[in-house]
Amino acid sequence: MSKDLPAVSPETFSLHGGYDPARSEGAVKPPLFATSTFAVKTAVELAGWFRQAYGLDGKPPSAPDGLIYSRLVNPDLQIFEERWSVYEGAEQSALCASGMAAIVTALLTLCRPGDTVLYSVPVYGGTDYFMEHLLPAFNIHTQSFPVTASGEDVTALIAQCQHDDQKVKVVYLESPANPTLSLADVGGIARAVHALGALRPMLVVDNTVLGPVFYRPMELGADLVVHSATKSIGGHSDLIAGIVCGSSELIAGVKATRTIFGTMADPHTAWLLLRSLETYKVRVEAAEKKAEKVVAFLRVHPTVEEVFFPDTCGGEQSACARSQCSGHGSLLSFTVRGGREAAYCVLDHLRVTRLAVSLGSTESLAEHPRTHTHSDITPADLDRFGITEGMIRLSVGLEDADDIIADLAQALNELL
Ligand SMILES: Cc1ncc(COP(=O)(O)O)c(C=O)c1O
């Protein structure tokens, strides 16, 4: 940590926190610590750190006081984790190899065979596959509920599981849901879960889509927040990473699992993320403004049936859920008349926006959730979640908004 850093906001901390240039030849930027292992002064010191890492002194496993090996700790990961924790409003964070690595590491830290996970739907396709197929294969039961469920609905579901002799260990929310952008009432569900007392389930929230500039699930009562840092945190489509954030106690457990599963990020990825974090707030705020203009254009285009954007989702979307975020980010979905053929036609004619999966990057990206990112989900469930044949997901980047709109216009006009 910089010695004379006063109390500062997350965006200032993300430039200076957790790093003292004096320890690295005065380098203003944290160097890339491209090393798998670390030289130690004495064998006794190294033995003590191993005792901490494995929890051999009657205490739970914890981060060792010194650097041993980059699967346990590396300075680039440490600096990033310290900076990100301030952004998210969490005590600690654990940087992982991907968003999926973060989700898997978090849930397998919290759950044991026989436990039950309740999860909101829809969720990202990879998460859906993990919930539907992999957790049950390890005898961890899973049950879905609509992302728009209330706190009372979730309480009733937990009671029903208890009645059926199932122990609910985790309530998992992805909010806003990818790709329908429906928001969960994280605050209401958190209150319901906390009211269950000491043996309550843990509340885990995937905050990938909006991120802490617009949405702060820790403050709403989440126990753990997970991210795909591949998206707006990395922000340049040049890395894959994930983050788990929470209390020091919970993250110590997550890091112990991460060490043995080997799901940590590599030092180069952490170093790239340090670069990305410096412009994080500027990027997400700029992209949001462009997305607002794109939404305004799509809403009145004759080929567009419906536009999904976090604070404009109507229907079941409660005002209460909407009031919990301070912005709507830059991810949107829209449906075109004419189903899959029309959606493919639009995607194939885009020239500025890239036809590619992922989101939150500097360049705009578009895809067809039903047959691309969410294609593992059964047709019946896709219908139930509103992921229709005509739906296109668009992540608005940092190109000039008028150029993005002109590109969309020429592609949509192919349908006229
Ligand atoms: C909401 C959400 N969570 C998690 C993930 C998984 O992240 P990763 O691709 O970094 O493993 C994704 C990927 O698209 C996502 O959209």
Image: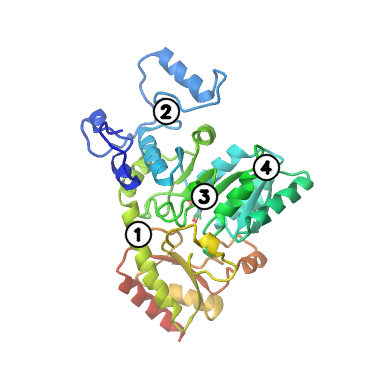
Label 1, residues with CA under 10 Å away: few <14, some 14-19, many ≥20? some
Q: Point out the frontmost of discs 3 and 2.
A: 3
Q: Secondary structure at mark 4?
A: loop
Quadrant of the image occupied by residue 198 = top right
Q: Secondary structure at mark 3?
A: helix
- Whole-number angstrom distance, CA of label 3 to CA of label 2: 36 Å
Whether label 4 touches label 2, CB < 8 Å? no
**Is residue 245 placed above or below 348 in the rendered structure?**
above
**In the drawing, does residue 165 fall left or right of residue 337?**
right
Whether label 4 touches label 1, CB < 8 Å? no
Q: For mark 1, what is the residue? A: 285
Query: Under 8 Å from ligand 1: the CB of mark 2?
Result: no
Q: Point out the frontmost of discs 3 and 1.
A: 3
- Whole-number angstrom distance, CA of label 4 to CA of label 2: 30 Å
Q: For mark 3, what is the residue? A: 220
- Whole-number angstrom distance, CA of label 2 to CA of label 1: 37 Å
Check the image and name the residue furthest to the right. Answer: 164
N-terminal-most mark, 2 or 1: 2
Q: Amino acid at mark 4?
A: Phe
Q: For mark 4, what is the residue? A: 138
Q: Quarter of the image containing the N terminus?
A: top left
N-terminal-most mark, 3 or 1: 3
Q: For mark 2, what is the residue? A: 69
Check the image and name the residue furthest to the bottom. Answer: 416
